[in-house]
Image (spheres, rainbow, N blue to C red):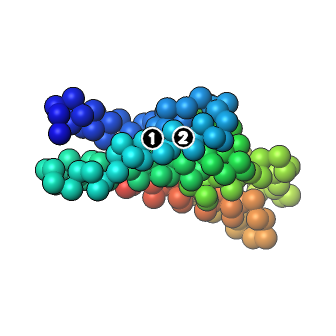
Amino acid sequence: MDAETKQEIITLAKTIDAMDYYQILKVRKRAFTQDIKTAYFNQSRRFHPDKFYNEDPRLVEMVNKIFKRVCEAYKVLSDQDKRATYTKAISGDDGQKYIRYNPKLYARLAKADKPEDEGQTPMGKKYYQMAQTGIRNKDYKSAKINLQLAIKMEPSNQTFKERLAEVDELLKMRSKKV
């Protein structure tokens, strides 16, 4: 393998976690389905792990990581519904947390058009609003506490329970990064 390809793999492996699926496949957001398919085949051939089986194991591990993300990108961008939700998510203010497709997080976005039940009781509403503020400020621990209190006030409120599950997921993701 030439030094240029090796350096490209090392650089891409370091930066791929910050790249969205369009960047990984090197296509525009308005690309046609056929363009996405062609880009996927080009990238998957280029970074297929079988091409690098004789290389240094660390380099093979990097290639595997790249290849998995290329396949993941194609899986999401080739499905029109997932693609629409994904594009909307990464275009928002908090787009960086949606870089990787996570069905649990995206379920919330898919329901964004439905009116949200922000509570029926004064205390339920108060705790829910405090939790929302915590989420906006990325203070997920206080958001979790306030959501738990809101659920105590309104045990049958599904919105509160869904938000708590999302916050728990965000806390898990954050603890894995540390």
Q: Provide residue 158's location: percent of width, then percent of height.
A: 76, 65
Under mark 1, the amino acid is Asn
Residues at marks 2 and 1 touching, judged by CB atoms closer than 8 Å: yes
Q: Provide residue 86's location: percent of width, then percent of height.
A: 63, 44
Q: Which of 173 and 134 is in front in this view?
A: 173
Where disc 1 sits, the SS reads helix
Residue assigned mark 2: 38
Residue assigned mark 1: 42
Q: Residue at x 36, y 42 (%)?
A: 46
Residue with the most extreme bottom position? 156
Q: State which quadrant residue 151 falls in.
A: bottom right
Q: How far apart are marks 2 and 1 (CA)?
A: 6 Å
Where disc 2 sits, the SS reads helix
Q: Provide residue 41's location: percent of width, then percent of height.
A: 48, 45
Under mark 2, the amino acid is Thr
Q: Which of 32 and 86 is in front in this view?
A: 32
Q: State which quadrant residue 85 falls in.
A: top right
Indicate left or right for 83 with 54 as reference. Answer: right
